Amino acid sequence: METGVIAKPSVWLYRENSSERTDELLMGWAVGILKEKEGWLEVVTHYGYTGWLQKEAVRLCEKEALREREENGQTIQVSKMHADVMEAPCVRAPILRTLQRGSLLTLLKERENGYVKVKLSDRTEGYIPALSYVRRRDSDAYLYKGMPPRYFLRQDLHQSCKGEETFRQQIISCACQYLGTPYRWGGKSAEGIDCSGLTFLCYRMAGLLIWRDAAIHPDYPVKKIAMEAAKPGDLLYFPGHVAIYLGDGSYLHATAHEKSYGCVRNSLRKNAADYREDLAESLLWAGSVW
């Protein structure tokens, strides 16, 4: 299987022979190429999701290159909602690209005038604010090792309560920053996001790859738990929908509902002003990695 990286700020993944979007892939994310057909590629993402995208959006690379870019420690990801890649380390410089949170870049040079020099997967070189990135926390190992996409890179969070608390706080902090974002089917960015795009991206930014859809998948680390056991940062599952639990009956999610559209907070409690009866009555179970 050949491999490649996304060489555009973002691209859509589609179902075969269909205009239905299924996922949004961001700059620098890796894919395995399964099949080519009339200018389109069937691919599997680094987190095990499949679909079709336009061939021109992918730059081919060797599997060893994916391994090396992780081992050299120079791979970083955009941590703000978005970041402009500038031609020079100056706020007035021309903007070369605008990247969404979670996009992957190569760090070339440390801080200079409040910026760092980076290289994009389309080989563009430029500068981003030094405060707009963090080191990459997930992995492409699913593509170059054939591993199930379910591992932490920075630490084993199950070793300490402190690690668990930090992880949960990171999930909620990331999710809250998307409040007010429009709903977009298949979306994974501040321009538009869907329910499982939100949960996937928040967990990925914290270092863990989970299934991208609104369901519990046996090959991924989220396991079914009783609602009574749910803690902040866990997931709530409804028919065709998923949300991030905030505690005390409150949850945050991306929804297309006419009365609570976009990325919003809602509640399972009847006496709450933001109570969603339809979801409260259809709640299936909670999910947790603990």
Image: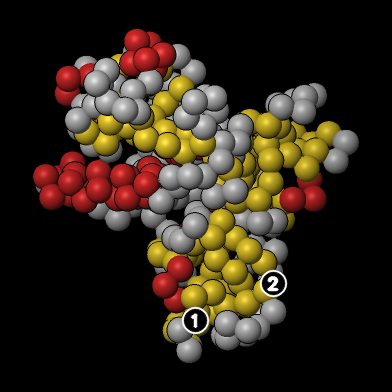
The residue under the point 68% across, 31% down is 21
Type of amino acid at the residue the image marks with label 1: Tyr
Type of amino acid at the residue the image marks with label 2: Leu
Measuring from the top left, give residue 96's x and y in whole percent: 69, 72
In this orientation, which residue lies closer to the viewer: 20 or 273?
273
Density class for disc 1 (Cα within 10 Å; few <14, some 14-19, many ≥20) is many
Q: Using the image, tell me which numbered label, if any, was put on residue 96.
A: 2
The residue under the point 65% across, 83% down is 93
The residue under the point 45% across, 68% down is 132
Measuring from the top left, give residue 220's x and y in whole percent: 39, 30
Name the element at disc 2: strand
Q: Is residue 111 visible?
A: yes
Looking at the image, tell me whether mark 2 or mark 1 is earlier in sequence order: 2
Q: CA distance from mark 2 to mark 1?
A: 15 Å
Name the element at disc 1: strand
Q: Residue furthest left?
A: 161
Measuring from the top left, give residue 244's x and y in whole percent: 34, 34
Q: Residue furthest top?
A: 281
Disc 1 target residue: 115
Left or right: 44 with respect to 149? right
The residue under the point 41% across, 14% down is 278
Q: Using the image, tell me which numbered label, if any, was put on residue 231.
A: none
Within the image, what quadrant is residue 59 found in? bottom right
In this orientation, which residue lies closer to the viewer: 173 or 59?
173
Q: Is residue 30 visible?
A: no
Q: Contact, CB < 8 Å: mark 2 with mark 1?
A: no
Measuring from the top left, give residue 176's x and y in whole percent: 37, 47
Left or right: 78 with respect to 154? right
In this orientation, which residue lies closer to the viewer: 15 or 263?
263
Q: How many marks?
A: 2
The relative height of residue 171 versus residue 261 in the rendered view (above or below) is below
Left or right: 135 with respect to 233? right
